[in-house]
Image (cartoon, rainbow, N blue to C red):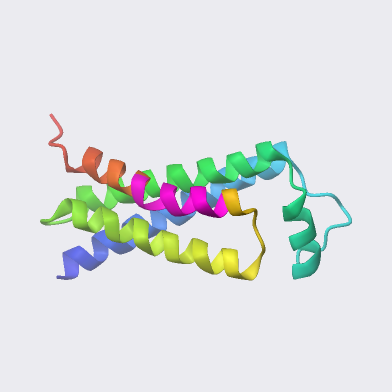
Amino acid sequence: MVKSILAVLTGLVVGFITIFLVELVAQQVYPLPSEVNLQDPEAMGAYMANAPMGSLVLVLMAYALGSFLGGMVAARLAPNKKMVHAIVVGILLLLAGIANFYLLPHPIWFIISAVIIYPLMSFFGGAMGSRDMP
């Protein structure tokens, strides 16, 4: 039981760190305008409504890579039922994403894409992590 919990927690940490790092790169490519106040949800909502498509695609890529790596790590560390651990990581990352969608408005296409990406990519990561390494 403890190994299962640690596998999921480690997968979550890997997922969150990956998402954070890719989003940092995305902010370098598509910096926020200086007039956008990060502490003002209305200003952030207005920015999100008009954000460049490329920046949103990079964020989706961050979600995909974070879910993939998090699922892969969880599956690799899990003592059994490796795919279950990977999917749990994807679902927990999805719940964090849903909380983010609740706090900041996002385009509907982005939300639908993210809801599909989180569990799907954690599944693929789990499949990769479940494979026996030579």
**Residue 15: where, in percent of width, then height?**
42, 52
96 over 129 or under it: above or below? below
48 over 2 or under it: above or below? above
The residue under the point 39% across, 49% down is: 67
27 horizontally vs 76: left or right: right
Q: Nearer the viewer, residue 18 or 49?
A: 49
Specify the segment rendered in magenta. 110-120
Q: Main secondary structure of the magenta part?
A: helix
The residue under the point 42% across, 49% down is: 116
**Residue 63: where, in percent of width, then height?**
48, 48
The residue under the point 74% across, 47% down is: 51
- Tell me the quarter of the picture where residue 92 sits: bottom left
- The reply to whether the magenta stretch includes residue 48 is no
78 horizontally vs 27: left or right: left
**Residue 2: where, in percent of width, then height?**
18, 70
Q: Is residue 86 visible?
A: yes
Q: Quadrant of the C terminus?
A: top left
Q: Nearer the viewer, residue 55 or 129?
A: 55
Q: Is residue 69 visible?
A: no
28 over 85 or under it: above or below? above
Q: Quadrant of the N terminus?
A: bottom left
**Residue 121: where, in percent of width, then height?**
36, 44
Query: How many callouts does the rendering have?
Result: 0
- Tell me the quarter of the picture where residue 52 sits: top right
The residue under the point 25% across, 46% down is: 126
